[in-house]
Amino acid sequence: MVSCEEAQVICNKNQYREASFFEKIQLMVHVLYCKACFKSSKKNKGLTRLIRKANLHSFSEAEKDYIKQRLHKQGES
Amino acid sequence: MAKTELHPETWVDRYADYLFNYAMVRVGDEDTAKDLVQETFIAGLKSAKNFEGNAAERTWLVAILKRKVIDHYRKSNTKKGKAEVRMHFNAESGQEGDWLEAKAADPYSIRENDDIENRELGLAIHRCISLLPENHARVFTLKTIREWSTEDICNELGITPSNLWVMVHRARTSLVECLNENWFKDS
């Protein structure tokens, strides 16, 4: 038996496909009897779906650092 | 209402990704979008003294970015022939997809707004991410958008995997709430 906290961690890992087969079974069993976790894992899955649909973009850390440097120089001159 | 002050040193971390997505929606090319965001920050810094504090920082930056996008299209429009509509009526014409009718929108489609909706969705998600505590936002972005492995993030930020999952969990919980509030209610 896993606790709700453990179930949540597994559920989050599962959103990134990092939950093991055994963990997935533990989660499935847990949500059978825990309504709260059943609901929250449903929402969590929904969030993953939304994010995938949105096709998000993000600067890499290096690019951000580069822009920061440029702004910094600009600010001094 | 209190006057807003500008904090240029926090701009990149707080608004770069939001503005990037905003620009991507409008120009559709990653490199162009990145350039426009950079120009926006620089222009913002230059005209920071003219900022009157009546708008939120992000709104003000978005206004600058809008001008940059318009300028971008003006520039590309001067190159002749860009606006030309091309349809190929070559030797294989008559094949499926070559007829104008095949290119027209399906009037019964319920999916025609999907694209626009997804773009708006991207902005809503980024707005919610920018409300997260900075370290949660960082971990979430690396993990979810840049799709780094757990191991790489832990090495880069010097945290343990269990730290990481706690942060991911907090971030995802707040995002679900934020999107419920700002996305599902509006639509």
Image (spheres, helix red, strand yellow):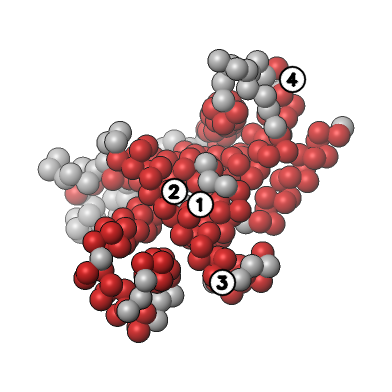
Q: Chain of mark 1?
A: A
Which residue, given by chain and number where applicable, does mark 4 sit on?
B49
Q: Which mark is residue B174?
A: 2
Q: Are marks 1 and 2 in contact (CB under 8 Å)?
A: no
C-alpha separation, residue under disc 4 versus residue under disc 2: 35 Å
Instruction: Tell me, yes or no, whether dots 4 and 1 are on the same chain.
Output: no
Q: Which mark is residue B161?
A: 3
Q: Nearer the viewer, residue B90 or B30?
A: B30
The image quadrant of residue A77 is top right
Return the x and y of residue B60 as percentages of the image width and height. Answer: 58, 25
Left or right of B66, for residue B111: left
Q: Of discs 4 and 2, which sits in the foreground?
A: 2
Q: Are marks 4 and 3 in contact (CB under 8 Å)?
A: no
Which badge, 4 or 3, is on the more N-terminal residue?
4
Q: Of discs 4 and 1, which sits in the foreground?
A: 4
Q: Residue at x 55, y 39 (%)?
A: B19
Q: How many marks?
A: 4
Q: Of discs 4 and 3, which sits in the foreground?
A: 3
C-alpha separation, residue under disc 3 versus residue under disc 1: 25 Å
The amino acid type found where label 4 is placed reads Lys
C-alpha separation, residue under disc 2 versus residue under disc 3: 20 Å
Q: Residues within 10 Å of mark 1 (few under 14, many from 20)?
A: some
The amino acid type found where label 1 is placed reads His
Q: Residues within 10 Å of mark 3 (few under 14, many from 20)?
A: some
Q: Of discs 3 and 1, which sits in the foreground?
A: 3
Q: Are marks 4 and 2 in contact (CB under 8 Å)?
A: no
Q: Residue at x 43, y 45 (%)?
A: B125
C-alpha separation, residue under disc 1 versus residue under disc 2: 20 Å
Instruction: Tell me, yes or no, whether dots 4 and 2 are on the same chain.
Output: yes
Return the x and y of residue A73 as percentages of the image width and height. Answer: 83, 39
Q: Residues within 10 Å of mark 4 (few under 14, many from 20)?
A: few
